Amino acid sequence: MTKKLFLFFFFIFLVQKSNSQETEPLSNIQKKLYDFEAVQVKPEFTDGKAKFVAYILENFKKTKTGKNFKGFISLNFVVEMDGSINEVVFNSDIKNKAKQDFKNVILKSPKWLCGEHEGYHVRTKVDFNFDII
């Protein structure tokens, strides 16, 4: 019994130790949010802008508001260091329900190739515009 108890606590200790590994702190370069034009390597959707628009249209058209929606969409968002999208802000005037549906589709998109500056992955603000005809 004592041996089993010892092994149990040893296992708990190993799990705790592996979960508490310290991550490398961010450099001063990584702490900033960069504009698209300011970074040395621009963030991009894996297969390019046309594929990102196709992804948005395909998934937005599946929503109630997307079925008959037409118009110009202007927005910006942040591509994070891991390639995920965050902080979606619309610059065009569209109804709240459509805005929320667009935002949900964009936030669930496949990861991007993130921006890089001075050899570091960085958070980058991207302006994005397209028409839905």
Image (tube, rainbow, N blue to C red):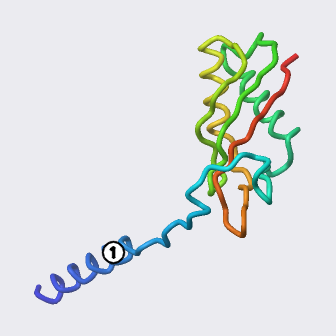
Left or right of residue 113, residue 15 in this image: left
Location of residue 8 in the rendering, given as x and y in whole percent from the top left corner: 22, 79
Q: At 63% from the left edge and 57% from the top edge, which residue is drawn?
A: 81
Q: At 76% from the left edge and 25% from the top edge, which residue is drawn?
A: 74
Check disc 1 and give the amino acid type: Val
Location of residue 27 in the rendering, given as x and y in whole percent from the top left corner: 56, 67
Nearer-the-camera pick, 52 or 90 = 90
Location of residue 44 in the rendering, given as x and y in whole percent from the top left corner: 79, 49
Disc 1 residue crowd, few under 14, some 14–19, many 20+, Cα 10 Å: few
Nearer-the-camera pick, 68 or 102 = 102
Q: At 24% from the left edge and 83% from the top edge, which residue is drawn?
A: 10
Left or right of residue 130, residue 79 in this image: left
**In the rendered image, which quarter contains the C terminus?**
top right
Picture quadrant of residue 29 = bottom right
Residue furthest to the bottom in view is: 3
Location of residue 11 in the rendering, given as x and y in whole percent from the top left corner: 28, 80
Residue ID for mark 1: 15
Q: At 60% from the left edge and 14% from the top edge, which residue is drawn?
A: 97
